[in-house]
Image: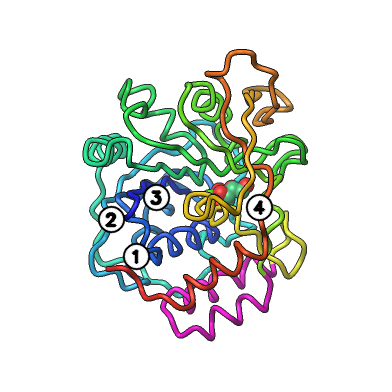
Amino acid sequence: MPTPILIDTDMGVDDAVAIALALASGDLEVAGLASVGGNVSLDQATLNIGRLLAGLGKETWPLMGRGLDQAQVGLRDASHVFGEDGLGGCSLPPPGRLETLDYLDLYERCIETHGRELVILAIGPLTNLAGVLRHRSGLLQRAGRIVVMGGAVWCKGNVTPHAEFNFYRDPGAAAAVLAAGLPVTVVPLDVTRQVALDESHVAQLSRAGTRAGDLLAEMIRFPLEAEGDAAHGSFLVHDALALGAVIWPPLFMRAQMALEVVVAGEQAGRSKPLVAKDKSRQIGVVMSVKVVDFVENMLERLCHQGFVV
Ligand code: RIB
Ligand code: CA
């Protein structure tokens, strides 16, 4: 029976890799896609979900929900890494149709339908999840695991020296979600920085003859050349790695610890390990990954399997 998954995404290029990987995985059922502001504006992130699904030629589309943007003005986005459109300026046209629920209704529908089977994968700022905690009390507690790409526990941030982008964009939301006693596993920069794609991987994708391979090869060219956290000529697949922790758990080593998120000031967005005697505050934190196995598995799925329609 495929595992149902709800993906909450700010739709940059690494988000697109993660979603294409999820759609190419017969052991997953993408039950819903919720947009959140972050890499790009909420409107653009919502549009990008439709662009990607149409571009991948999906016959049936997962339920879509339009989420929230961050309230704070003047926050940095990631257009310098992923392009103004968030998807590397690729040739994907706007989708013909885009029917979206409100994100709260999407979460409610997916959790009512799938209950504890549902995995929630949060690969953008946690603004929507904090919104569900606030407006639908008790709902997230009825879902299953929550896997979050975010944080920089022992390494430098990628936006400020302290903060990783998703936690930087909404530190209050990250603090609320990590302290809510939910079954959360965080996949931080400490690990995602270990997995970089380069031209050889892009060549493999473009030779595959799959829609995903063609699309992702085109999208990844922009971040490969962009000046950002990754070395020039390489592309960090942060979000696809977080999905990998759902699909291939044996490739990942985790620890249990409490993480505190600094919510204001110069260190806002910093995720600090806490010695918490109260075990209910502890969450999973991915510490390492078998890099070669993960990259091989990911490319195998993206290059050699048609989409599960
Ligand atoms: O710091 C990396 C994370 O921020 C990734 O999810 C990337 O897509 C951006 O959202
Ligand atoms: Ca993301």
Please tell me whether mark 3 sits on a helix, a strand or a loop.
Answer: helix
Label 4 packing within 10 angstroms: few (<14), some (14-19), many (20+): many
Mark 4 or 2, closer to the camera: 4
Q: Amino acid at mark 1?
A: Leu
Q: Nearer the viewer, residue 24 or 277?
A: 277
Quickly name the residue at label 1.
Answer: 53
Q: CA distance from mark 1 to mark 3?
A: 16 Å
Q: Could you tell me residue 239's position as x and y percent? A: 55, 53
Query: Where does the C terminus fall, quadrant-wise?
Result: bottom left
Q: Specify the segment rendered in magenta.
A: 198-225
Instruction: Residue type at mark 2: give it.
Output: Pro
Magenta residues, dominant SS class: helix
Q: Which residue is mark 2?
A: 62
Residues at circles 1 and 3 in contact by the CB criterion of under 8 Å: no
Q: Choose the circle earlier in sequence order: 4 or 2.
A: 2
Residues under numbered marks 3 and 2 in contact, where contact means CB atoms less than 8 Å apart: no
Labels 4 and 2 touching (C-beta < 8 A): no
Marks 3/4: CA distance? 34 Å
**For residue 258: magenta?**
no
Q: Quadrant of the N terminus?
A: bottom left
Pointer 2 with pointer 1, Cβ within 8 A? yes
Q: Residue at x 60, y 62 (%)?
A: 294
